[in-house]
Image (cartoon, rainbow, N blue to C red):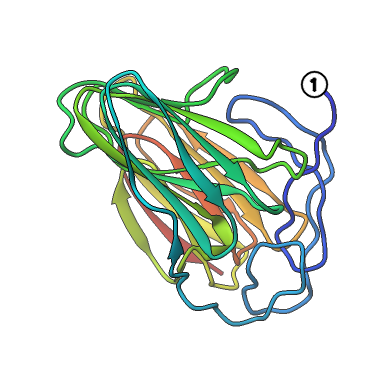
């Protein structure tokens, strides 16, 4: 595939990375500012302190079975929300050079769940049971403004889409079950991952987009406790149906 530039992780840069969750881009990674404090992931000058939680949102849109809904605009400080019942397409418009975090609440669903997008070789997330969690998409700066998300589910669901620049910071050990996208503020070189798969078909995939030129991709299919290079602060996208704990490690 051709070279694509990924949305930069610091206030002054944009570059390309390999995206291994479905398709590949270029090989030049983003380069951070020299500050040891976390910065929001953007292509304009960012402060070294967290920004307030954004309040501007688009209205929730209810959609019928097998429909397509336009959730609206996703930008820094502006999120979009859509709800439906059963399989549906969700379209939205990405405004600005940012990656989009998709948060799915399908806790009231009754069967298998899949979150994907047109043309993907593998889904963002897939579970034989109702699935709730967060996923990361649109990580290349030349991704189109008009985007589409596909939700395949049985029952009612809601998706919220926001810029990864609007994620709240976390620090220290974080635990969960299922897919997640987290923005660590810790200034460390590694993370320790403890993982227990849901079943024999489950696996763990971690993608760390950092404020340096040291993006990392790692994972395994078996239960494990391992230390991986991470070079935080940065955003980590976790893809699994299992249970995990990630601990920033000096």
Q: Residue at x 60, y 67 (%)?
A: 233
Q: Position of residue 37 (x, y in %)?
A: 64, 79
When asked about the image quadrant of residue 146, the answer is top right
- Classify mark 1: residues with Cα within 10 Å, few (<14), some (14-19) or many (20+): few
Q: Quadrant of the N terminus?
A: top right
Q: Position of residue 64 (x, y in %)?
A: 27, 26
- Dot 1 falls on a residue whose secondary structure is loop
Q: Nearer the viewer, residue 49 or 152?
A: 152
When asked about the image quadrant of residue 178, the answer is top left
Q: Is residue 75 above or below residue 108?
A: below
In this rendering, would 228 be left or right of 59? right
Q: Residue at x 59, y 50 (%)?
A: 208
Q: Nearer the viewer, residue 76 or 132?
A: 76
Q: Residue at x 63, y 31 (%)?
A: 20
Q: Position of residue 67 (x, y in %)?
A: 36, 22
Q: Is residue 124 above or below residue 102?
A: above
What residue would you read off at disc 1?
Answer: 1
Q: Quadrant of the C terminus?
A: bottom right
């Amino acid at each position: 595939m051709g070279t694509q530039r990924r949305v930069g992780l610091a206030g002054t840069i944009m570059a390309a990375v390999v995206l291994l969750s479905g398709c590949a881009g270029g090989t030049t990674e983003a380069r951070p500012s020299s500050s040891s404090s976390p910065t929001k992931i953007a292509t304009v000058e960012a402060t070294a302190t967290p920004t307030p939680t954004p309040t501007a949102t688009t209205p929730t849109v209810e959609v019928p079975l097998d429909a397509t809904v336009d959730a609206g605009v996703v930008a820094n400080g502006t999120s979009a929300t859509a709800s439906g019942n059963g399989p549906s397409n969700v379209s939205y418009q990405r405004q600005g050079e940012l990656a989009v975090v998709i948060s799915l609440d399908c806790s009231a669903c009754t069967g298998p769940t899949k979150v994907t997008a047109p043309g993907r070789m593998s889904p963002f997330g897939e579970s034989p049971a109702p699935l709730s969690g967060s996923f990361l998409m649109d990580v290349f700066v030349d991704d189109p403004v008009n985007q589409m998300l596909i939700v395949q589910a049985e029952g009612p669901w809601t998706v919220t889409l926001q810029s990864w620049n609007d994620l709240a910071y976390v620090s220290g050990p974080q635990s969960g079950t299922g897919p997640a996208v987290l923005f660590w503020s810790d200034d460390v070189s590694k993370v320790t991952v403890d993982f227990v798969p849901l079943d024999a078909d489950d696996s763990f995939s971690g993608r760390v987009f950092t404020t340096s030129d040291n993006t990392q991709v790692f994972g395994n299919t078996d239960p494990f406790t391992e230390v991986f290079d991470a070079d935080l602060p940065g955003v980590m996208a976790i893809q699994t149906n299992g249970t995990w704990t990630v601990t920033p490690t000096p």
